Image (cartoon, helix red, strand yellow):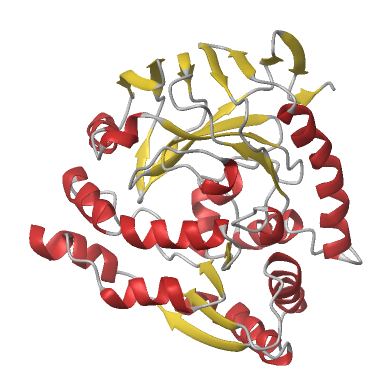
Amino acid sequence: MADPRHQRLAEVLLHYALGVAPGDKLLIVSAPPAAPLLREVYRAALRAGAHPEAQLELEGLQELRLRESSDEQLGYLSQVRLWEADYYDAHLRIGAAENTMALSGVEPRRLALAQRAQAPVRGRLSARTARKELRRTGTLFPTQAYAQQAGMALADYEAFLFGACLLDRDDPAAAWRALAAAWQRIADFLARHDQIRIVAPDTDLTYRVGGRTWINSSGSNATGSLNFPSGEVYTGPLEDSVDGVVRFTYPAVYQGNLVEDVRLTFRDGRVVDASAARGQALLEAMLDLDPGARSLGEVAFGLNDHITRFTGNILLDEKIGGTMHVALGQAYPNSGGRNQSALHWDLICDLREGRVYADGDLCYAAGRFTI
């Protein structure tokens, strides 16, 4: 018997998040554990008149490639992936990991080499999305691995995840639209200001955003959201404007590798000093990935009060209400950001003991905007 929550999530993903229309070519990428949700998404896509295609990724193949490939193989870019980036009208990725730390033993240099090789694909996807030629989003299917990483029983994690998607509401899409209206007021306020200063324990960071576009990421690709559930406002800072120090409250997970207690110092827009209590080698490898990796491509505030705890999964954690995050590397073109990199790595800072100033005026305290 089908889980009604899978059916409801499929409907919200197809109709609210992606806006799938008759004739759309839809690519769905997932893994075998997500089969119950994948079936419902496929069914909903057919009923919407779309042309769905499913790709299944087997656990362990990526790890095998990263461990066993030569440098030449790691640097290889498949023309099929480039073709896919240009062909489909909509992309949906359903994360369903069985081991979230499978890549934790891979040499950082090899991770960086593989990441750099795939940059053209990510660039095409990002450019097409900005031009509104492509709609794409990512979501999660609750697995034992995700539940364990979050420190939860699977049933509790399922309730948490589906609750964060607002599937318990009579009309989830209407509930998301109501949140979108509230968050738009924050995006509009920030758009009227230039200098943003964030002050929190071990953090005093300033950046400028004048002329850039603040995106209200409220679950729908039409408003700039690339994952579901969502709940943030973000933009790209002026590339040379970031100055100060920041200590990230939560561990950063990158390609299955845990990096803890990250501290960065910025000067004229670039990281000039970086340390981590754990994962220093990976941190340095990512910062040296390419010239754009030491600059910020994104600055954002998490607004989703339905994501109530840290889980170790960035799709959820960067949306936690009362936080801010920045991303090293690639900017989103729709924000006006210009930084380019093969890297896009989000790091999160809790602001419930912090303050934010917009052009010198206090606008955020104790985890909330006070506008």
**Residue 141 in sight from this viewpoint:** no
The residue drawn where x is 42% and y is 41% is 345
Which picture quadrant has residue 226? Answer: bottom right
- Which residue sits furthest top? 360
- Work out whether 197 lies above or below 258: above
Q: Quadrant of the N terminus?
A: bottom right
- Work out whether 302 lies above or below 146: above
Given residues 222 and 48, the one toward you in this image is: 222
The residue drawn where x is 81% and y is 49% is 180
> Could you say where residue 166 lies in the image, as x and y percent from the top left?
79, 58
> Could you say where residue 306 lies in the image, as x and y percent from the top left?
76, 46
The residue drawn where x is 9% and y is 57% is 71
The residue drawn where x is 51% and y is 46% is 332
Question: On the rendered structure, is 146 left or right of 363?
Answer: left
Given residues 240 and 32, the one toward you in this image is: 240
- Work out whether 102 lies above or below 47: above
> Could you say where residue 27 lies in the image, as x and y percent from the top left?
51, 79
Given residues 265 and 354, the one toward you in this image is: 265
> Could you say where residue 31 lies in the image, as x and y percent from the top left?
45, 75
Which picture quadrant has residue 278? Answer: top left
Q: Quadrant of the C terminus?
A: top right
**Residue 152 in sight from this viewpoint:** yes
Question: On the rendered structure, is 17 left or right of 243?
Answer: right
- Work out whether 181 lies above or below 277: below
